[in-house]
Image (cartoon, rainbow, N blue to C red):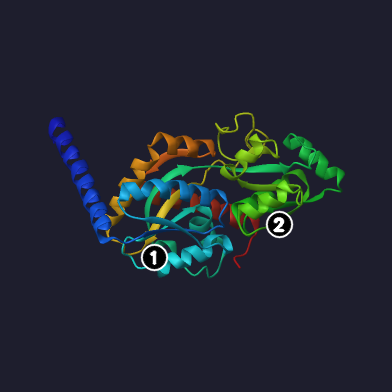
Amino acid sequence: MPQPARRRALLAGVVLALTCAAGATSALAQSGKTVRILVGFPAGGGTDAIARLLSDKLKDALGAPVIVENRPGAGGQLAAQALKAAAPDGTTFFISHDHTISILPLVTKNPGFDPARDFVPVAGFATFVNAFAASGGTPAKRFDEYVKWVQSQGGKSAVGVPAPASVPEFLVKVIGDKYKLDLVAAPYRGSAPLIGDMLGNQIPAGVASVPEFVEHHKAGKLRVLAVLGGARQPALPDVPTFAELGLAGFEEVPYYAFFAPAGTPQPVIDGFGAALAKVIEMPEVRNRLTSLGLAVGYMPQQQLAARERAYSQVWAKIIRDSGFQPQ
């Protein structure tokens, strides 16, 4: 096909996709139905804050009421099960990061859902990294100082994680093995209660996502000592990566995305995706997400699906090599 004809065909495809998306959004607005965004973690946590920021703008982009519904528990498992049970009519979506979609099926024998069968990816909007932080009552200001502090405590210490059998828990084990420390992962029901205990100096350290830690780090209430990923984070430019500290293998970064029940019509998915793409380009939304430590970038449905598969493959090997048995 000649180049001008190819460009015309591409343009026609884009116009058609946008027209279908607009039609789906219009149909949703005319129905008068409320859109639910399920969140698998408690109110007050990082995922909840992101969901509420986006929902506030999505209601205008979709032309329909949008509410956030928290279904905390089991690392997002309860919210995922609620998504599976929801009608595929375009009124229920699930905002999730990697743990529920990619990790839970690897560490749980019967999670109550199969992402490949029960869900359909809608669109992604950001990536982020996890971080290791020390509580205010812990004297360490750098990661090597933290290691020395644990050694001074007999080589044993607790590290809080947002959920059992999560990426943070596996990171705690890898850190303990590398530095010959007896680090005990203490699982919480989400990042909000974990950080609450860290701020109260009830636990000396924790692993969670940068969005959950960044504001407290900037306020001096806790100290982020290292981050995962292949590069330092714009929100924390002075904090080294674990790779810089000699702990490689954690460069594949997790994602934030929306999912819908299997069977949701493609025009509805396209419409929601188009609305999301519009919202994250709003300067106030992009700036806020960036300030929370997210790398904002739209991922259409197929790109999100490919990223989820690649992420699951990386962590399947790490989990298998750790000797962990699904429970």
Mark 1 is surrounded, within 10 Å at the Cα level, by few (under 14), some (14 to 19) or many (20 or more) other residues, namely few
Residue, x 14% and y 31% (percent of image)?
A: 4
- Res. 306 visible in picture: no
Quadrant in which residue 32 is drawn: bottom left
Residue 326, percent from left and from top: 59, 65
Mark 2 is surrounded, within 10 Å at the Cα level, by few (under 14), some (14 to 19) or many (20 or more) other residues, namely some
- Res. 30 visible in picture: yes
Locate residue 68 relative to residue 145 in the image: left or right.
left
Disc 1 element: helix
State which quarter of the image contains the N terminus.
Answer: top left
Q: Which residue is mark 2?
A: 186
At label 2, the amino acid type is: Ala
Disc 2 element: strand
At label 1, the amino acid type is: Arg
Residue 211, percent from left and from top: 56, 43
Looking at the image, is 220 positioned above or below residue 122? Answer: above
Residue 284, percent from left and from top: 43, 36
Q: Nearer the viewer, mark 2 or mark 1?
A: 2
Q: Which residue is mark 1?
A: 117
Locate residue 107 relative to residue 37 in the image: left or right.
right
State which quarter of the image contains the C terminus.
Answer: bottom right
Residue, x 32% and y 60% (percent of image)?
A: 90
